[in-house]
C-alpha cells in the first residue's frame, strides 16, 4: 500500500547497487503496483540482463504484460517464471515466499493442482502466510469446490479476518 515509497526504495537500490538484479526486480514490482507497466518492463529487463532466467523477475514481467493486455507475451513469461521458480525453490527449500511466487506462476498458466501444492508448501513453512490460503480459496472457487473454498475461509479467519472476508465475498458469488 506504499507504492511511492517502494518506487523510491527500488530506485535507491538500483543506484547504490547497479550490478545487483534484486533492486531492479523490486522496482519492477513497485511499478506494476503503480500501474506503470512500461516502466516495469524496462526495469525487469534490466534485472534479467544481470540474472537471466530469474523466476521472480519473469513473473513480474508477466504481470506487466498482463496489465498491458498482451496475453500471449504474459503467458510466455509466466511459463518461464515457473521454470525459474522451480529452480529457486529447489535451491531455497525453506523459503516460503519462493513457494508462494511459484504458486502464483502455476496459477497464471492454469496448473491449478501444482499451484495448490506450492501454496501448501508455503503454508507448511509459514502457517501465517495468509495470501497462500486466500489464493487456494480462489482456485477452489474457480474449480467450483465450495467446500474447499470454505475450508480456506475458515483457516483465514484465524490469521487475517480482512482477507477472510474478501474470500467469503467471492465464495458467496458462487
Image (cartoon, helix red, strand yellow):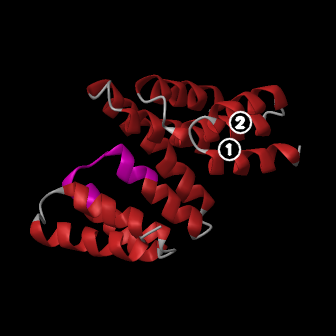
Which residue is tagged 2?
A: 153
Looking at the image, do the residues carrying marks 2 and 1 touch, with CB atoms under 8 Å apart? yes
- Residue 72: x and y, percent? 59, 56
Tag of residue 15? none
Q: How many marks?
A: 2
Q: Is residue 57 magenta?
A: yes
- Locate residue 6: give its quadrant: bottom left
Q: Is residue 106 above or below residue 76?
A: above
- Residue 51: x and y, percent? 22, 50
- Locate residue 43: give its quadrant: bottom left
Q: Is residue 109 visible?
A: no
Magenta residues (range):
47-59
Question: Which secondary structure dominates the residues rendered in magenta?
Answer: helix
Q: Residue at x 54, y 56 (%)?
A: 74
Pointer 2 or 1: first along the chain = 2
Tag of residue 164? 1
Nearest to the observer: residue 167 or residue 79: 167
- Residue 108: x and y, percent? 59, 45
- Locate residue 67: give its quadrant: bottom right
Q: Residue at x 26, y 49 (%)?
A: 52
Give SS at disc 1. Answer: helix
**CA gap, disc 2 to disc 1?**
5 Å
Amino acid at each position: 500500500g506504499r507504492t511511492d515509497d517502494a518506487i523510491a526504495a527500488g530506485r535507491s537500490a538500483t543506484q547504490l547497487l547497479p550490478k545487483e538484479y534484486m533492486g531492479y526486480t523490486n522496482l519492477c514490482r513497485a511499478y506494476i503496483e503503480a500501474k506503470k507497466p512500461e516502466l516495469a518492463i524496462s526495469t525487469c529487463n534490466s534485472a534479467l540482463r544481470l540474472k537471466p532466467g530469474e523466476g521472480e523477475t519473469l513473473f513480474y514481467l508477466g504481470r506487466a504484460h498482463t496489465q498491458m493486455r498482451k496475453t500471449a507475451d504474459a503467458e510466455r513469461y509466466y511459463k518461464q517464471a515457473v521454470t525459474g521458480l522451480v529452480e529457486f525453490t529447489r535451491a531455497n527449500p525453506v523459503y516460503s515466499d519462493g513457494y508462494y511466487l511459484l504458486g502464483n506462476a502455476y496459477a497464471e498458466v492454469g496448473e491449478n493442482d501444482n499451484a495448490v501444492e506450492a501454496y501448501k508448501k508455503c503454508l507448511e513453512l509459514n502457517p501465517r502466510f495468509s495470501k497462500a490460503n486466500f489464493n487456494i480459496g480462489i482456485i477452489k472457487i474457480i474449480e467450483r469446490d465450495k467446500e474447499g473454498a470454505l475450508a480456506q475461509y475458515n483457516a483465514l479467519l484465524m490469521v487475517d479476518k480482512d482477507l477472510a472476508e474478501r474470500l467469503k465475498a467471492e465464495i458467496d458469488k458462487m
